Amino acid sequence: MPHLKVKPFDSNIIATHIATSTVMTFVATAIHTDDILIGISHQDESFLLQLKPDKEGFLLKYDKVTRPLKVNILKEALAIVAQELALEIQSSNITISSTKVVPSSEYLKKIEDFVDIQYPKDTVSVEVGFGSGKHLLYQAQKNPDTLFIGLEIHTPSAQQVLKQIALQNIQNIWVVNYDARLFLEMLPSNLCKEIFVHFPVPWDKKPLRRVISKSFLSESMRVLAVDGRLELRTDSDNYFWYALETFFSVPQTSVEIRKNEALEVTSKYEARWLRQEKDIYDVYVKSKALSTQIKEPIVFDFYGIHYTEGIEETLAKEALVYEGYFVHFERIFRISAKRLLIKCAFGSFDRPEHKYVLLAEESCTYFVSPPVQTKVNLMAHEKLIMQFLPQHIALKDNNV
C-alpha cells in the first residue's frame, strides 16, 4: 500500500502548517509512544495518515482503520503532505496510476449507506469474499434483473472489480469493501435470493476468524427469503466438516451436499486444484422460514459527553470483557489540551469493530464514521459511554 520513507524532521512543524494546508485538518500525537496521526480531508474523503519514526527517518503511510478504497486518493494526499511540509523523500511508492480505466465509484457503497438505502432490483444476491470477481461478474451478466452485492476486505481486489464494472458496463453490482460478518446485519430480513461463499480462507489455526459461524449462519437465514440459499464452496476437508456441523445446528433449514460439481465459471485457483485432482465440496443451506423484520435503526449517540481534564487517565488500561463482547482502548492520541483521538476495539470477539473516538471540549463523535448497526456494537457503545460518564455526573439525572 502507498507510503513514503522520509528523512528525519521536526514533527512539531506539522501543527504550524495545519491552518494553511489544503488537506491536513489536525495532528495527533500518541500519549505513550512516538506515533503521530495526521487528519486528512481530500476528494470528499476523510481519513488518517500515520507517521512512524525510526532510527533512519519517518515512515508516512495510510491508517488501516480509516483508509479510503481508492488508492490514488491516498497517494495524492501523501504527495501533498510531503510537499507542504517540504519533506526529503528517501523512497516512495506513490506513483499515480496512469491507467485510463477509472474504478466505477457509482457502484462502490460504504457500510453507512445501508442505513437507509433503496435497492434498484427486486431480487438481491450477495457474494462474500469475491476475490478476482470472476464469479461475481459472470453472475451479474447472466442475471441482469438481480442486484449483486459483492463483499471483499482485500482492497486491491475490490478496486479491480470496480474497474471491470466500468470496462464491461455492468450496472447491477454494488461493491462493499467491508467484513461480511458485520455487513449482513445491515440488510433487511428476507431480502436475498442467494448468498455465495466460495473458497473462504480456512483459518485452521484461528477458527474464530472464519466467515462461517453460528452467528453468520443465523444472520444469513434471516436475510435470505424463504427457499433462498447459502452456497458454500470449499476445497478444504476441515472447513467442509466444520461447516456441516455448523449448518446442522440451526433449525428449519434444508442442507444439500455435492462433491466435485462443475460450475459454468471457474477461477484460476479452482482450475489449479482441479488439475491436482483435489476434491471440491459444495454445501447448500436453504432457508425454510419467514424472518421478522429488523426494528428501528440503532443510533450511536454520546449524549452530550465531552472532554474534561484528566479523563484520559480514567479510561480502562486493559480490555473490558463482558459476556459475548468486549471494549478496549488501544491507544490515546492528543490533538490539543482539550481534544483527544482515541483508538478503540470493541464488539464481538470473532468480529470486532475498530474505530476512533474524537473527544473534544464541546462534543464526542466517532471518526470517520459510526460502527455497524449491530446489537453487540450497541452494547459495547454503551460501555464506552460508561467509561466517559464518571466525568459527566449530570447525565445520570437524565437516565442515560
Image: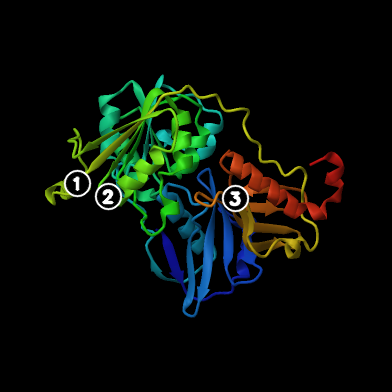
Residue 26 seen anywhere in this rendered image of the structure: no
Say whether marks 3 and 2 touch (CB < 8 Å).
Answer: no
Q: Which residue is mark 2?
A: 237
Please name whichever residue, 237 or 302, is drawn nearer the observer in this view of the structure. Answer: 237
Residue 112: quarter of image: top right
Residue 19 image point, x, y percent = 65, 57
Tell me the mark number nearer the camera, choosing from 3 and 2.
2
Above or below residue 149? Residue 92 is: below
Packing grade of label 2 (10 A; few <14, some 14-19, many >=20) is few
Q: Name the quarter where the N terminus is drawn.
A: bottom left
Tell me what residue is drawn at x 70 percent, y 62 percent: 316
Q: Which residue is mark 1?
A: 279
Residue 182 seen anywhere in this rendered image of the structure: yes
Q: Which residue is mark 3?
A: 325
Three-letter code, disc 2: Asp
Three-letter code, disc 1: Asp
Residue 234 image point, x, y percent = 28, 44
- Label 1 sits on a secondary structure element that is loop
Q: Sequence-wise, which precedes: disc 3 or disc 1?
A: 1
Say whether marks 2 and 1 touch (CB < 8 Å).
Answer: yes
Labels in figure, total: 3
